[in-house]
Image (cartoon, rainbow, N blue to C red):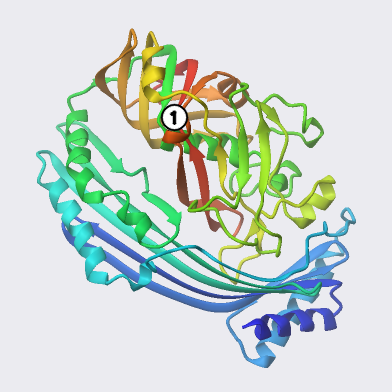
């Protein structure tokens, strides 16, 4: 399937492009939604097409097409080049694309059970069973479960000589229970909000043991109706790993995207508080804060062989002992900044322009455990599972809410509390990190719905994290 992409690249070059690349993409997806024992949605989607990107000067043109005829491919390449020429009429900085290895290669996600080949009845039966068990708990009115899978082939060709085939396999899912009382609702979800997604086969779903956890999750949702409100004030908080993963995504991952730092991207989620001239000098957090962008992590949702520019997957240090040292970049943004390309450019389908996206932006584990954190906390709150989030367009001032919390008093876990929230300013908050869970509690949490760009693109990202403790954080904020 290299031929359609090659035809589009050759057409772009013939139309005057100085560089061109193209992706032939075959994608299949499946989504199942179950509510209270009934199948509410079942979608199977297939798409096939070519996206060609052309450069003229230092400007890009892009065109995507599902017309795979010879004329359709020639037209796509020609139109991408014409758009690049038109874009070049707007003055901008001149640059050469950062060098990457020119390779002929292939990559396939390691997996055991292709998720789209697992019988549909087996997947539906699991979700129905889970929701029926949750719905049987008193005061549970909404019991939902979902499953999603993606099977994607990409053939990438560039005018520099790249020829790369990738087969990416991703899947996951989860469930939640909503309890309704006289004047409020409470929700618990598993394995995390919006489910847990990974690269790999259906074995990645089996390991989370949905059925064994359904009853507990429903009981917790019901118990929250009678729980005390989260206390207010400054105190120590312990964030379980999936909540810390979202904290990383919002207050670090988006902030370190080089296109935001350069001011190229601001449409969907703002820019960044980071300034490139402070790279290597800016204090992002405490000495316990070590963050990498690692597209090579086995099983994590942001793992692949090559990005959509043909750059090999790699591990890039982002924060080293609290010091900001790296960014998420592609060949163009890296060239502008004078940095090595990070291999972090991806597109949501053949018909979208590749842009800088998170890979697996994760916090490396520490040496503590949740039990040790609780034992060394005089007054605080343990918070679990994201419920809400808000952060400004510089990725500085934020507020998060969690589904459930437990008070900590004199080193012991106390009563359950509801509506736990916390707020902070990004570098100040990360400076308050004083204990961090170890490798045994480190999980590659996946985010399947990261939005960016205009028109918006959805990316799959990974965020490895273990539980962390933060001192003197403002909690219990309302509104």
Image: 264 above or below 23: above
Image: 104 above or below 407: below
- Quadrant housing residue 15: bottom right
Single out the residue that lies furthest toward the bottom.
70
Residue 264 is left or right of residue 405, and the answer is right
Q: Nearer the viewer, residue 189 or 64?
A: 189
The residue sitting at 34% across, 11% down in the picture is 411
Image: 334 above or below 221: below
Residue 277 is left or right of residue 31, and the answer is right
The residue sitting at 72% across, 39% down in the picture is 326
Residue 474 is left or right of residue 138, and the answer is right
State the image coordinates of residue 131 (x, y, percent, origin top left). Answer: 18, 52
Q: Nearer the viewer, residue 64 or 341?
A: 341
Which residue matches tag 1? 467
Q: Nearer the viewer, residue 55 or 306?
A: 306
- Quadrant housing residue 310: bottom right
Count of all numbered marks drawn on residues in the image:
1
Q: Is residue 36 visible?
A: no
Q: Is residue 269 visible?
A: yes
The residue sitting at 18% across, 58% down in the picture is 128
Q: The N terminus appears in which quarter of the rendering?
A: bottom right
- Quadrant housing residue 173: bottom left
Q: The C terminus appears in which quarter of the rendering?
A: top left
Image: 277 above or below 433: below
Q: Nearer the viewer, residue 100 or 279?
A: 100
Characterize the local packing of mark 1: few (<14), some (14-19) or many (20 or more) Cα atoms within 10 angstroms: many
State the image coordinates of residue 426 (x, y, percent, origin top left). Answer: 59, 27
The residue sitting at 59% across, 50% down in the picture is 359
State the image coordinates of residue 65 (x, y, percent, origin top left). Answer: 61, 79
State the image coordinates of residue 27 (x, y, percent, origin top left). Answer: 50, 73
């Amino acid at each position: 399937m290299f031929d359609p992409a090659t035809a589009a690249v050759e057409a772009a070059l013939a139309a005057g492009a100085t560089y061109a690349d193209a992706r032939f993409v075959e994608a299949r997806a499946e989504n199942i939604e179950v509510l209270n024992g009934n199948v509410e949605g079942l979608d199977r989607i297939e798409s096939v097409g070519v996206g060609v990107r052309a450069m003229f000067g230092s400007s890009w043109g892009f065109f995507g097409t599902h017309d795979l005829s010879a004329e359709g491919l020639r037209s796509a390449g020609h139109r991408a080049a014409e758009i690049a020429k038109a874009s070049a009429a707007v003055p901008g900085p001149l640059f050469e694309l950062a060098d990457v290895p020119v390779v002929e290669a292939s990559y396939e996600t390691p997996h055991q059970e292709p998720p789209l080949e697992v019988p549909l009845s087996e997947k539906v039966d699991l979700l129905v069973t889970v929701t029926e068990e949750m719905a049987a708990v008193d005061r549970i009115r909404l019991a939902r479960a979902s499953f999603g899978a993606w099977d994607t082939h990409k053939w990438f060709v560039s005018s520099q000589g790249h020829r790369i085939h990738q087969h990416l396999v991703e899947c996951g899912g989860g469930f939640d229970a909503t309890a309704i009382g006289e004047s409020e609702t409470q929700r618990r979800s598993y394995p995390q909000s919006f489910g847990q997604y990974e690269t790999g086969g259906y074995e990645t779903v089996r390991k989370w043991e949905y059925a064994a956890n359904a009853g507990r999750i429903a009981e917790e949702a019901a118990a929250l109706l009678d729980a005390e409100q989260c206390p207010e004030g400054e105190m120590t908080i312990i964030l379980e790993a999936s909540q810390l993963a979202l904290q990383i995504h919002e207050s670090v991952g988006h902030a370190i995207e080089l296109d935001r730092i350069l001011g190229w991207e601001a449409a969907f989620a703002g820019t960044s508080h980071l300034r490139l001239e402070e790279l290597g000098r800016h204090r992002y957090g405490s000495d316990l804060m070590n963050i990498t962008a690692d597209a090579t992590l086995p099983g994590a949702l942001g793992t692949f062989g090559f990005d959509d520019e043909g750059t090999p997957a790699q591990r890039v240090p982002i924060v080293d002992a609290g010091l900001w040292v790296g960014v998420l970049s592609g060949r163009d943004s890296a060239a502008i900044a004078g940095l090595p390309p990070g291999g972090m450019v991806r597109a949501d389908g053949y018909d979208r322009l590749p842009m800088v996206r998170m890979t697996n932006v994760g916090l490396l584990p520490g040496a503590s455990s949740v039990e040790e954190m609780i034992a060394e906390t005089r007054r605080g709150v343990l918070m679990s599972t994201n419920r809400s989030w808000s952060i400004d367009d510089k990725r500085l001032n934020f507020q998060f809410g969690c589904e459930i919390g437990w008070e900590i008093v004199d080193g012991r876990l106390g009563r359950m509390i509801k509506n736990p929230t916390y707020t902070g300013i990004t570098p100040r908050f990360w400076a308050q990190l004083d204990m961090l869970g170890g490798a045994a509690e480190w999980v590659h949490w996946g985010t399947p719905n990261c939005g960016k760009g205009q028109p918006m693109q959805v990316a799959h990202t990974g965020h490895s994290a273990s539980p962390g403790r933060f001192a003197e954080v403002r909690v219990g904020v309302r509104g």
